[in-house]
Amino acid sequence: MSTTGRDLARRLWLLLALGAATTLVLFGAYRGVHDDTVPLASSSTPGILAVDSAKNALRQAHAAVDGSGPGGDATGDFHTQISVAHQSIAVAASENVTGLADRHTLQTVTGLITVYSAWVERAGQETDASLRGAYLYYAEQGQSDIVDRLDDLRNDQLEVAREQASFPWPLRLGWGAVLVLCLVMCAALVEAQWFARHRFRSAVHPPLLAATVLCASGVAILGWFTVRAHTAMGDSLAELRATRSADEIPETGADVERYMADAGFWASLSEWVLVGGVLLMALTLVGLWPRISEYRFRVPR
């Protein structure tokens, strides 16, 4: 009695199950890395650099205050830098890196800058040296408080960026499972081709061969993109950790933009994982189902 049909059906169901499992695990592992690439590049980086710009602007504004005498200029460079600080805080708020806490902190900082500016303006208008000194003291305390709050916010933003750039053990486990499933899938496809060749004297089985190439090359390419993305995120995080002067901030932004130039492309490939998985299972079905059909209505001998 021939068992070829039953053997083929068993191999088909095994390959379909392996194909589905490989696709789903690869989809989860790939998205686990690449879902964070775009937010790191388009939100976290501008938010952190905006806070750096605000801090530098406040320091430069305070330096301008220290250089003004009684009745001196409190409207020139000081107000220019305060305007830069407000604009930078608005950018940081729009990026919303840390969520609700981010917005609350920036709202508080905006109010404190207004109070700080008022003390500076009163000092600039005061002719009495002692009163002017008192106003500048209050202004200096306010400026220190603002910078401390911005430092705390920056640390929180960096923590978000660290999480986005991290490769924790669940992702490592997921990619390990992808590698194992891919090897098992390819081995099962090769065995099915060998079985078909042995039973049907067919030198090449194109659909099964195509499925093998698709599985191996697809996982290899997506794995390579993941390595590149993880490296780019690590380099970006290293740039963001360093405290930058006002002149260095644009250069840092340009460096991160260069590292993460392909982030959108990498992330967009996650949807194609499912398409590739469907194609993989379709090729498997096309490769084995016609042979199985030849045995469906045969009477066992």
Image (cartoon, rainbow, N blue to C red):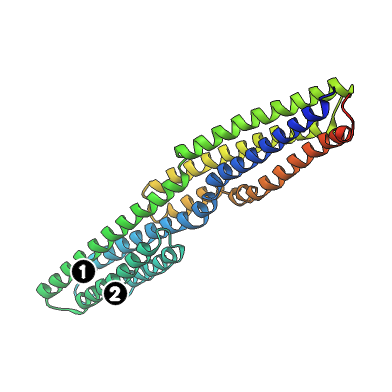
Give residue 216's position: percent from left, percent from top.
69, 32
Give residue 198's position: percent from left, percent from top.
84, 20
Mark 2 belongs to which amino acid?
Thr
**Circle number at residue 114:** 2
Query: Residue 130's quadrant in the figure?
Result: bottom left
Q: Nearer the viewer, mark 2 or mark 1?
A: 2
Mark 1 belongs to which amino acid?
Ala
Number of other residues with Cα within 10 Å of mark 2, as a class: few under 14, some 14 to 19, many 20 or more: some
Residue position marked by numbered label 1 in the rendering:
139
First in sequence, mark 2 or 1: give its number.
2
Number of other residues with Cα within 10 Å of mark 1, as a class: few under 14, some 14 to 19, many 20 or more: many
Give residue 293's position: percent from left, percent from top.
87, 36
Give above or below for 156 relative to 187: below
Give above or below for 205 relative to 53: above
Give above or below for 176 relative to 198: below
Query: Residue 112's quadrant in the figure?
Result: bottom left
For the point 82% across and 34% down, the residue is 288
For the point 30% across and 65% down, the residue is 61
Quadrant housing the C terminus: top right
Q: Residue furthest left?
A: 130
Element marked by disc 2: helix
- Note whether residue 203 is visible: no
Report, in whole angstroms, how far the alpha carbon at label 2 lies from the one at label 1. Answer: 11 Å
Give 218 or 43, whichever is nearer the viewer.
Answer: 218
For the point 63% across and 39% down, the residue is 21
